[in-house]
Amino acid sequence: MSAQKRTMKASTKKRKSTAPKAKPKRTTKPPAKKRASVAPKAKRTTKAPAKSAPPKSKRGSKAPPKKRASVAPKAKAKTRARKSKPPVRVTAVPTSAPKKAKTTKSALHTRICDMFGIEYPIIQTGMGWVSGASLTSATSRAGGLGILAAATMTFRELQEAIAKVKSRTDKPFGVNMRADQSDIMKRVDLLIREKVKVASFAQAPGERVIKTFKDAGVLTMPTIGARRHAEKVQAWGVDAVIAQGQEGGGHTGHIPTSILIPDVSAAVDIPVVGAGGFRDGRGLVAALALGGAGIAMGTRFLLTKDSQVPDHVKQIYLDTKANGTVVTKAVDGYPQRVIRTFLIEQLEKANPLTRFPRAALNALSLMKVTGTSLPELIEEGLAMKQNQELTWAQLAMAANAPMLTKASIVDGRVEAGILPTGQITGVIDEIPTVAELLQRIMAEAEATLERLGA
């Protein structure tokens, strides 16, 4: 330690002696002067306590480590505080699960849910003689959109059916009509007065009907079977369309549902509801994936406990296989999918001359059942011929479908009637309530989305 002091003294002496000579150079280095002035003070202060002080002073000069040691815990505290953040991030992982659940719900909450005011994007179609007040109100109560089949009702029956539905539920529902009925505007006014949410049509209604409904706030939704039909009715102002593929029951087209839905949804801006071949949640997800905004089902709703179809007729549907249906024009001149029965085979074998008398008798029967007068029947027939470009033979046969359907669906005389159905009947094996059906479809749809990682 004495050797160090000597060297330090020698250095101070040298600095003092060299200071005058190196003035111009050292003026640029004020730290040298500070070190010279500070160094003696440091020695004097350290010399006062004792000789052992210098080591302490040196260690004291290394005092920052002590401060660092005191700072280190703070630094560690900070780092611990930072390490405490990952648990927050970990706790954020469970919160992501509800987000996925919300995504699932929003994926199933489509445009028609908001448009029609329904909980689920599921529609029960207006099947003649099947979709009465019971089935329609049950569907709307369960969260879907029930639709009354008014085409086979008299005006008075339609009034009573609407009143029954409104007495059983306050949820939105619809009414299916034929645009070529002689009293169509009278029925339009009834729907407007009763504040019915949706008016659906088996075929495109006229522009006058659409405009009248639109001005009154009633939504219109026709069923179409081709892209060009969807483009046409959208230009007229309809709010949505049901695109029914060839798998559907009753009057149907030639294009499969899986081809029709994406083709139509790409062509129009309005919501497209898929129909034909749907029965469960997997089908609902498939329809949404194809560009649809929901599904419409007929046969699946027919085979519920809320349907008024006789039980022994429902059993025939359950016993029918997927290849047990046929699309035929023998009933009324239009392609119609029905269960293959002995009567259908007889109709297909018959020639037009033998079909015509039967069709004429059915026309008279339909006139009595629906309360239509002969002049009204003629007027309605002329409108059908003009709007649908029917031949006189087809016009006479047009009464076949509703009357033959009534014979089996309402009267239970299967041997004397026809059984309209979708191909989906071949894979249905039970009869739930409507509420059970809709809850199951939505649960299956959510499970399907989760399985797909959506």
Image (cartoon, rainbow, N blue to C red):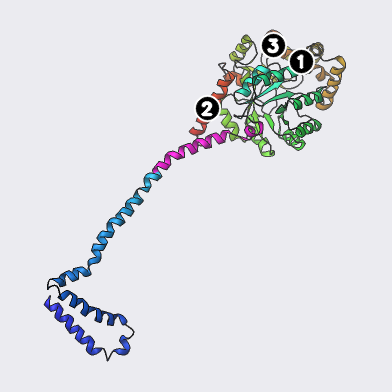
Q: Is residue 79 left or right of residue 197?
A: left
- Tell me the magenta residue range: 90-119
> Is label 1 in a helix, a strand or a loop?
helix
User: Residue 260: x percent and y percent?
Assistant: 66, 32
Distance between mark 3 and mark 1 Cα atoms:
15 Å
Give the residue at x 58% y 31%. Answer: 286
- Quadrant in the picture for the N terminus: bottom left
**What is the number of the mark on residue 400?**
1
Q: Residues within 10 Å of mark 2 (few under 14, many from 20)?
A: some
Per the image, the residue denoted by label 3 is: 410
Q: Quadrant of residue 17?
A: bottom left
Q: Position of residue 28 (x, y in %)?
A: 34, 84
Q: Position of residue 271 (x, y in %)?
A: 66, 35
Q: Which sits in the foreground, 336 or 187? A: 187
Report the residue that reaches farthest toward the front: 48
Element under disc 2 = helix
111 is within the stretch colored magenta: yes
Question: What amino acid type should be assigned to the residue bearing mark 1?
Answer: Asn
Viewer-closest of 139 and 71: 71
